Amino acid sequence: MGQFEELWMYCKETFGIVKQRLVLFVPRLIMTGLFMALVFIIVGSAFLGILQGKGVLGMPLAVIMIGLMTLVGNLVVESGQIGLFSKAALGHSIGMRDFGEGIGKFIGRVFAGGILFILLFLIIGMTALILFVIPVLNIVAVVGMVVAMLVVSVFLSAWKAALAFKDLDVAEAFRDSYRFAREFFWPMALVVFVRGLFDGSNNNKGHEGGQGSLSVGGINININLPGINIPGVDTGTILGIGSVAALLAVIHIAAAAAIISTVMTVYIDQLVFVIYARRENISQEIF
């Protein structure tokens, strides 16, 4: 059997696993819902501030708070889901109790692993930046950085599975993931690439021409109202009204996009645990 045929077999098995264990999606969907609610609350508060002539002075602090809450929430969810994914991959019944046990058991190592990932990507980025300042190597630096980040992501794609199934520390899990991915590189590269398509869909980007836009659930919304001039209403108020109108118009689309992204991310994360468990011959008796 070829490696991609083997991957397809694991994909079908994983589909059966997640279909029978919908609790796998609950933590991530809850976090996604809370994040979207916070975004809409802050946008609404900013709109009220504009209408009352108070501006949006508290917006930077609110954005920082959302960022911190997102980081902490991701840390908790990622840790808890290791407990769910590992047991589901071995055919066990799972519940939110397993999620809680995963938080207690893995949160420290997930935090340490995240720090190491940041350091690795910073090293790659700094190296690319040094090469980028050399005119002849501009394109090489950009392409090299993208390829290096993808390769690192592939080689370390199974480190959380190694934590769960072999109870390793972070450094050992990284080494074990490197060994594992090296033997199954191209299928794991495909898995990592597809996951990145869904996991990186919520980038907030403005239009290049200096126009304002907002991204919610991966949907870019232009909130400028060019050519509109309402007597007695200032530009800030018009912008606020436009923002709310745009958000209300696409809220259902943004919610659907966020749910699809979340479902696919959870499925692919579970797939990685299934691949690792089968290829490493992990026994059900470890839990």
Image: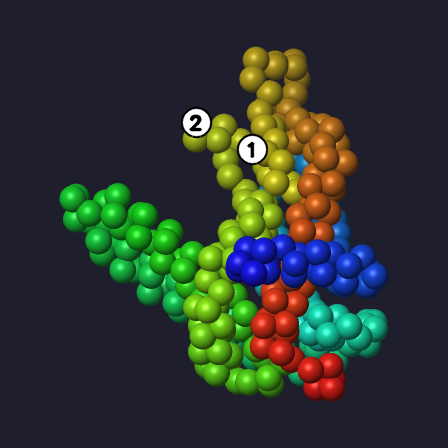
Of all residues, the one furthest to the front in this rendering is: 1
From this view, report whether residue 139 is shown above or below residue 26.
Answer: above
Q: Are marks 1 and 2 in contact (CB under 8 Å)?
A: no
- Judge from the rendering whether residue 25 lies leftward or rightward of residue 175; answer left or right: right
Residue in front for this viewpoint, 232 or 257: 257
Q: Which mark is residue 213?
A: 1
Residue in front for this viewpoint, 16 or 146: 16
- Judge from the rendering whether residue 282 lies leftward or rightward of residue 148; answer left or right: right
Q: Amino acid at mark 2?
A: Gly
Residue at which label 2 appears = 209
Can residue 261 be seen in this snapshot?
yes
Q: Please name the residue shown 70% across and 45% down the image.
A: 260
From this view, report whether residue 28 is shown above or below residue 218.
Answer: below
Quadrant of residue 255 within the rendered picture: top right
From this view, report whether residue 68 is shown above or below residue 259.
Answer: below
Of the 4 image quadrants, the one containing the N terminus is bottom right
